[in-house]
Image (tube, rainbow, N blue to C red):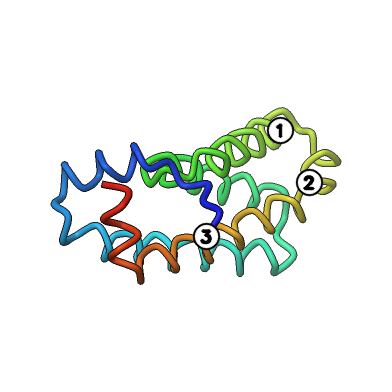
Amino acid sequence: MATTINSETIKRLADEVGEDTVSLLLNVFSDELEQYSKQLSAHPSVDQIGEISHAIKSSAASFGADDLALMAQECEYRVKQGQDDWMIDHLSEFRQMVEGMVVEYKQLAGNNELINRML
């Protein structure tokens, strides 16, 4: 798996919650991202995209999805600035990024060997 998950963040998470809990939390995070992906696919308003972006921003950073966190931060900023056209133009890219991270985190959560290599 060509990973875009920050292994240092996963290590810190394991130190905080214990190695046994990491897989469970990764599953919860991937399920959360999957719900956001569905919401982003359901023709949300720009304001809804802003709310979703805000929610993704902090959780993505907490779980080492750094690129996704940056994209979510940018989307949230653009919505707050009233740059609706920019957001609509980049919605597909944002949604695809969320969908890609769902796959990566589900694969990671289901592979203890891979998790252990990150720790």
Residue contact at pointers 1 and 2, CB within 8 angstroms: yes
Identify which residue is drawn at 72% across, 55% down.
45
Q: CA distance from mark 3 to mark 1?
A: 32 Å
Question: Which is in the foreground here, disc 3 or disc 1?
Answer: 3
Residue displayed at 61% across by 62% down: 99
- Residue 1 circle label: 3
- Per the rendering, the mark at residue 90 is 2
Q: CA distance from mark 1 to mark 2?
A: 10 Å
Point out the tag, 1 or 2, that comes first from the N-terminus.
1
- Secondary structure at badge 2 equals helix
Q: Residue furthest top?
A: 81
In the image, 87: left or right of 72?
right
Residue 81 placement (x, y as % from top left)? 72, 28
* Residue found at x 60% / y 64%: 37
In this rendering, would 50 be left or right of 14?
right
User: Can you say whether 13 is above or below 95 in the image?
Assistant: above
Instruction: Identify which amino acid the numbered label 1 is placed on.
Output: Arg
> For the residue labelled by badge 3, is the local secondary structure a helix, a strand or a loop?
loop
Q: Nearer the viewer, residue 22 or 113?
A: 113
Please name the amino acid that badge 3 sits on.
Met
Q: Residue 86, located in which quarter of the rendered image? A: top right
Q: Is disc 1 surrounded by few (<14), some (14 to 19) or many (20+) residues within 10 Å? A: some
* Residue contact at pointers 3 and 1, CB within 8 angstroms: no
| Residue at mark 1 | 78
| Mark 2: amino acid | His
Q: Earlier in the sequence, mark 3 or mark 1?
A: 3
Q: Position of residue 61 (x, y in %)?
A: 43, 39
The numbered mark, 3 or 2, whose residue comes first in the sequence reads 3
Residue at the (58%, 35%) spot, across then down: 70
